[in-house]
Image (cartoon, coloured by chain):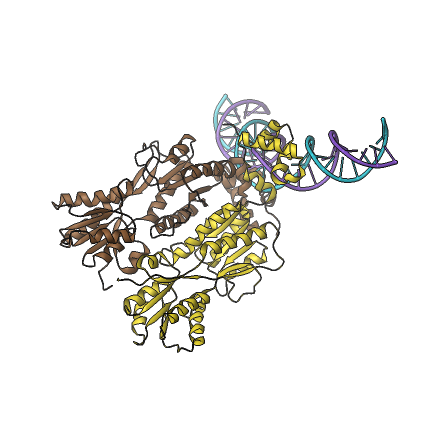
Chain colours: A brown, B yellow, C purple, D cyan
Amino acid sequence: MEKVTIATVAERAGVSRQTVSNVINTPEVVRAETRERVREAITSLGYRVNQAARQMRTGRSRLIAVRIEPGSDGINGSVLDRFLHGLTDAATLAGYRVMLYTAADDDHEIATYDDLLTAHDLDGFVLTSTHHGDPRTSWLAARDVPFVTFGRPWGAPDTHSWVDVDNAAGTAAATRHLIEAGHRRIGFLGWPAGSGVGDSRRTGWESTMTDAGLTLSAVAAVDGVDAGADAAARFDSAITAVVCASDSLALGALRARPDCAVIGFDDTAVAAAIGLTSVSQPLTEAAARCMDMLTELLDGRAPATPTQLLLPPSLVVRPPRRR
Amino acid sequence: MEKVTIATVAERAGVSRQTVSNVINTPEVVRAETRERVREAITSLGYRVNQAARQMRTGRSRLIAVRIEPGSDGINGSVLDRFLHGLTDAATLAGYRVMLYTAADDDHEIATYDDLLTAHDLDGFVLTSTHHGDPRTSWLAARDVPFVTFGRPWGAPDTHSWVDVDNAAGTAAATRHLIEAGHRRIGFLGWPAGSGVGDSRRTGWESTMTDAGLTLSAVAAVDGVDAGADAAARFDSAITAVVCASDSLALGALRARPDCAVIGFDDTAVAAAIGLTSVSQPLTEAAARCMDMLTELLDGRAPATPTQLLLPPSLVVRPPRRR
DNA sequence: ATCTGACTCTTGAACGATCAAATTCTGGTC
DNA sequence: GACCAGAATTTGATCGTTCAAGAGTCAGAT
């Protein structure tokens, strides 16, 4: 199988290298008849552009990078994995490929950016798990590197495009669902204050309860299944339902208070397996929109102002059953 | 920030381009003194090799590809995700980067190989989910593409290197554990016959039972939590324990037979969450060994005969608790 | 008949590295 | 001090593509 280059195609089609290149990159400047002839040569020879050569000339790689968490195989790690699946699909559709990297912390991650950019000419980044005081976005912005975050900037100025899920709307929907089912004393089991995501999830419950004129009787802030169970056990015994910031916490609540209706967050495999009602993030959708925004940036057809998109989660209701 | 190329470094160090290249790729041919001078120039300028240029000349990309399952967010998908995490770490350590791709089926996957190889000069592949009559390995082998599989060849000749987990040993350990705990009537809940993995898991239980002189009283072959529950419900009521081919099935068994001791397989987040004893695959280890084998192939220092490695899984015992 | 300009296509150079071959250095020997 | 072998270094070509600029063709206007 001989190596097929643009020159092979040119010879076969009886045109010059550049014309072949034009057929591939700017077909509209080539006469229709010639274009067809070249295309036939391309397919009959099975020609494919050599990305390395193109990259060297143009400085673009058609590669985007995503971080994969080092050892996240907990109950919640799967959220990012599902996002990654969606992103890979969306990137492939847009003609990009996804490259993975790991980093122990934000500083290492920034060092990796530097490497990926200079050594591999990466075209863009999709950042996940943004947080307060995130140094990564400013580093990238300062160097004019195209990037999008899955997660809002949390306090930093809104100068880049991002996609996020409306966490508050998720817990609000969960709370409303319980109220409509007749519950009046609904507790909230969440994470310690300070994380943007956790705080929003609490806010959704809080505002919905207040709007309905209900009292915010029971609240706890912990992490992990066992801590969740302990906290739920200490809830006022009059509580009949609990909204949780994660499926792990929900699992704890279920164990400590089998009498209560419990709703989790993230709709993980655990929730599906045990029939737990849970708030589901539209991760595939989020990934697709991230990719849309990123390709806009990369193709230079981005709107003047960065796009911000807050996606509504949905409540996956599962009928209670014997456990 | 000016662009730093090998020529910039050469000028700064007062040597030629080729000498800089030698310092990077074959340092032993450069005099120690010169080598040091060049290295200083490299670090002081922050030079990094341009992969595209190197790749064009050498035809190697230092990239390996791994398939990511399109929509696998079920209970079992997480196994491959955990493997992927380990592989990314191992690849980074070995100086490679991981590129992702998706494919609907084996044929699409082969078409993707072709694209990745010709367009991106991919150096190697790690295949997962090998199965009987897998067309992928023979395609790759016929083209002399370096690859390793996570999963044995299942019937195909052992002509390539692979790593797999000893499934039979896993269920054997689970069965032994139950026997030692005093159980005598132990059922098996597995998948329909035909899948190599499922059959091995069954074999481990079967041989351990036979060796212990126990009767193979209850066996079922289904898939999914609900089907698992139905099948377990039909088990002989004298059964006191069940070994399962997956955590999903275990969940079903647990629901149908709360009186039984149940052991799952894969040690997924679900198992950890509900306190289910489960067989754990050494995925990080498997990924690291896959990468070892692949780099051996890529560096041309592979042993004459392909390496085959069967890793023992471990039993994660979780104390039974109120559910 | 010549010119103009739009359209189409071709040519030579360049991207940044490595390969292969040529050249210069070094130290030891007679 | 000339000579030589081996080590160290340099030079020119090359990988496959795209950029920038140049060249040819043709219809319509002058």
Front residue of this view, candidates B21 and B166: B166
Task: Kindly give the residue lying farthest to the left in the view shown.
Answer: A213
Viewed as shown, does residue B118 lie left or right of A202? right
Q: Position of residue B150 (x, y in %)?
A: 49, 58
Front residue of this view, candidates B71 and B319: B319
Residue B99 visible, this angle: no
Q: Position of residue B254 (x, y in %)?
A: 30, 66
- Give the answer, above or below, for where B35 lies relative to B243: above
Front residue of this view, candidates B275 and A81: B275
Residue at image location 43% in from the left, 61% down from the top: B314
**On-image quarter of the C terminus of chain A:** bottom left
Residue B81 visible, this angle: yes
Residue at image location 56% in from the left, 65% down from the top: B157
Viewed as shown, does residue B4 lie left or right of A174? right
Within the image, what quadrant is residue A256 found in? bottom left
- Give the answer, above or below, for where A282 lies relative to B129: above
Viewed as shown, does residue A226 lie left or right of B69? left
Q: Position of residue B315 (x, y in %)?
A: 41, 62
Q: Position of residue A141 (x, y in %)?
A: 40, 32
Marks counted in the figure total 0
